[in-house]
Amino acid sequence: MEVMADTTVLIDIWRYGKTPRRLGDLTSKLGEAAILVPWITQAEFSRGALFKNVSLERVAEFYKSFHLVPLDQAVMDAYCRLWVEMARAGHAADYPDLWIAACAVARKIPILTRNPKHFTNVPALKAIGYEIV
């Protein structure tokens, strides 16, 4: 199984990777799934890491644990369809979250997030929420 990672997933693995008990709920919901990291999640995480004075080389090393997903035509098409459908339904979508959702919808896989409410109005998307305990 594969899951698309919201930025919260990378933040939590970065912060609590050395204290895995904090990641218990994440680990139990993830199981044997491969974590895919969309380009927008990678950009958000890298931007935050750089702001915290973490070198991009160290971040690049961290990314080796994940499957990176580039922006492609399928994602762009999914984003446009989702945006139009949600706008017509009166649901304002958060820009980065909709791109992350589009990556998951384009590949027909669930999204893994600590903030499932950010994705509740996204059509055709299954969100797997978790908590840090």
Image (spheres, rainbow, N blue to C red):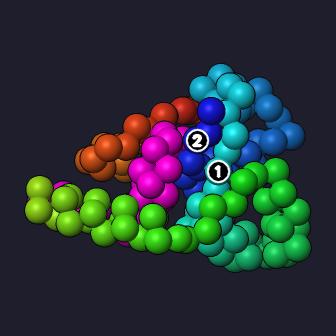
Residue found at the far front of this picture: 73
Query: Which amino acid does the dot numbered 1 rest on?
Result: Leu
Question: Label 2 sits on what residue type?
Answer: Val
Separation of residues labelled 2 and 1 (CA atoms): 6 Å
Magenta range is 90-113
Residue 119 location, x and y as percent? 36, 48
Expressed as whole percent of the image width and height from the top left, the position of residue 76 reads 42, 70
Asked whether 92 or 50 is in front, the reply is 92
Relative to the observer, which residue lies in front, 24 or 97? Answer: 97
Q: Are marks 2 and 1 in contact (CB under 8 Å)?
A: yes
Q: Quadrant of residue 47?
A: bottom right
Toward the viewer: 54 or 126?
A: 126
Is disc 1 placed on a helix, strand or loop? strand
The secondary structure type at the circle numbered 2 is strand
Compared with 8, 27 (above or below) is: above
Q: Is residue 28 left or right of residue 4?
A: right
Q: Residues within 10 Å of mark 1 (few under 14, many from 20)?
A: many
Which residue corresponds to the image point at 83% horizontal and 68% vertical from the top-left?
Answer: 60
Residue 79's place in the image compared with 30, above or below, is: below
Residue 90 x %, y %: 12, 59
Q: Earlier in the sequence, mark 2 or mark 1?
A: 2
Residue 120 found in image quarter: top left
Seen in the image, is 20 located left or right of residue 112? right
Q: Which residue is mark 2?
A: 3
Q: Residue at x 72, y 54 (%)?
A: 67
Residue 48 visible:
no
Q: Is residue 45 magenta?
A: no
Q: Quadrant of the N terminus?
A: top right
Q: Which residue is mark 1?
A: 36
